[in-house]
């Protein structure tokens, strides 16, 4: 049976589809129904901000999902009046989303951006804070805007100018960490990204040489904010790496520039990185890309969005197979329990009431 739940909140209405099939159910007056916004797969979670449906790209673990929902009903910009209030805010915000704290900044300066990116980040302004806070968050003058990525232990500081274009660019560029490790969850974060993605394909993300390369990529990302930098290990996600013709048989690390969908570009002469002086090779790669020394390629298999949907489809297939197997198991157990014993009173009773039993079982099967 299809089911949905909602909060009676004028600005936020979550709609959660969690079933495999649906049937007609009674609906409260004014309630949002699943038929109005059909889901593409199950489970599906939709948000309605001021009546406008939004796709949910947040975490799906129970504790993180609750934290995500709390963010939506929190103020667009939280006002912090002490060091302890700042610490409490950062702790309550968790590690899934980036956190922006304006020190000595009027909340009206970032209100529009806070509303625009409410589903992607936390926003706050600190009215009162000590020198210890300035040391902790590594800024030396006010006003300033600090961007934190707790899960990646990264932070950036913006000192202005606090005009719409400059401030908006800083906020947008810091919604992602300097270098994004690609997996199923982070890949969804790139869906709306307009910048090109510099993707480095490694053999194994956990190898020491890979970690050294990631540090170099962070430095390159800081100097090239108009690009998104990311990496993926063949060992960690072989199917995804194979879409860019990278596998254990090709020379790795391999660097490409990806448009986030069906096209990517090789830089002629820097298709892969040697072990020595990789910092210089990264600079040559970026220089070659900007100068147009590139070879256009097409991603193998489905497009980016089709690939995301295929992953959801695979999970759905697994769920359906599991449910069908469990139903068959339960049905077989039920048949064994209902089977009469030869020569027993149960057999006599069963023979005497076969017509009634057939009718009853037929009704039960129809209900199932």
Image (spheres, grey):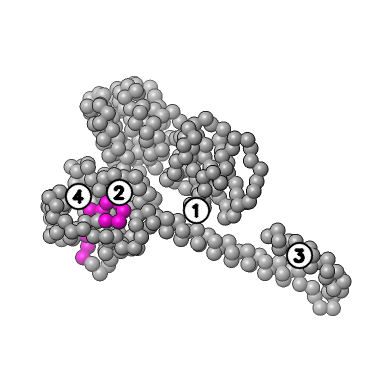
- For this orientation, the residue located farthest to the bottom is 343
* Label of residue 361 in the image: 3
Q: Does the magenta stretch include residue 260?
A: yes
Image position of 225 (left or right of 192): left
**Image mark for residue 216:** 4
Between 166 and 64, the residue placed more toward the observer is 166
Q: Where is residue 188 in the image (x, y as percent from the top left)?
A: 37, 49
Q: What stretch of residues is rendered in magenta? A: 251-263
List x then y, in percent, for residue 319: 53, 60
Tell me the quarter of the image containing the C terminus.
bottom right
Question: Depth-wise, is mark 1 or mark 4 nearer the camera?
Answer: 1
Q: What element carries label 4?
A: helix
Badge 4 or badge 2: first in the primary sequence: 2
Give the residue at x 39% y 42%.
96
Is residue 49 placed above or below 130 in the rendered structure?
A: below
Residue with the mark numbered 2 = 180
x and y percentages locating residue 320 in the rendered image: 54, 61
Q: In which quarter of the image is residue 193?
A: top left
At horizontal 25% and vertical 48% (from top left) the residue drawn is: 196
User: Gap in Å between the C-alphas at discs 3 and 4?
Assistant: 69 Å
Q: To which quarter of the image does residue 29 belong? A: top right
Question: Which label's residue is closer to the chain start, 2 or 1?
Answer: 1
């Amino acid at each position: 049976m299809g089911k949905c739940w909602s909060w009676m909140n004028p600005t936020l209405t979550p709609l959660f589809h969690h079933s495999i099939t649906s049937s007609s159910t009674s609906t409260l007056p004014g309630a949002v129904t699943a038929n109005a916004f059909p889901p593409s797969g199950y489970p599906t979670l939709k948000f309605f901000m001021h009546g406008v449906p939004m796709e949910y790209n947040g975490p799906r673990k129970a504790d993180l999902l609750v934290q995500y929902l709390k963010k939506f009903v929190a103020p667009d910009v939280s006002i912090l009046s002490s060091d302890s209030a700042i610490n409490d805010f950062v702790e309550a915000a968790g590690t899934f989303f980036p956190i922006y704290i304006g020190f000595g900044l009027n909340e009206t300066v970032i209100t529009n951006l806070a509303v625009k990116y409410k589903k992607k980040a936390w926003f706050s302004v600190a009215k009162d804070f000590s020198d210890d806070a300035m040391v902790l968050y590594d800024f030396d003058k006010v006003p300033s805007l600090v961007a934190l990525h707790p899960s990646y232990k990264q932070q950036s500081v913006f000192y202005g100018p606090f005009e719409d274009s400059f401030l908006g660019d800083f906020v947008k560029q810091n919604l992602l960490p300097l270098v994004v490790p690609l997996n199923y969850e982070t890949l969804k974060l790139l869906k709306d990204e307009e910048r090109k993605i510099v993707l480095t394909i490694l053999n194994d993300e956990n190898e020491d040489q890979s970690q050294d390369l990631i540090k170099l990529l962070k430095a390159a990302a800081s100097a090239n904010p108009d690009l998104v930098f990311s990496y993926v290990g063949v060992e960690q996600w072989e199917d995804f790496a194979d879409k860019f013709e990278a596998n254990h048989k090709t020379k790795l690390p391999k660097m490409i520039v990806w448009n986030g969908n069906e096209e990517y570009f090789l830089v002629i002469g820097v298709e892969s990185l040697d072990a020595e002086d990789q910092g210089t090779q990264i600079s040559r790669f970026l220089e070659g890309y900007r100068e147009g020394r590139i070879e256009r390629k097409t991603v193998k298999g489905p497009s980016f969005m089709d690939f995301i949907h295929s992953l959801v489809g695979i999970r759905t297939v697994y769920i359906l197979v599991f449910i069908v197997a469990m139903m068959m198991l339960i049905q077989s157990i039920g048949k064994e329990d209902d089977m009469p014993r030869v020569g027993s009173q149960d057999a006599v009773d069963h023979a005497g009431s076969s017509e009634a039993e057939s009718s009853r079982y037929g009704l039960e099967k129809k209900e199932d």
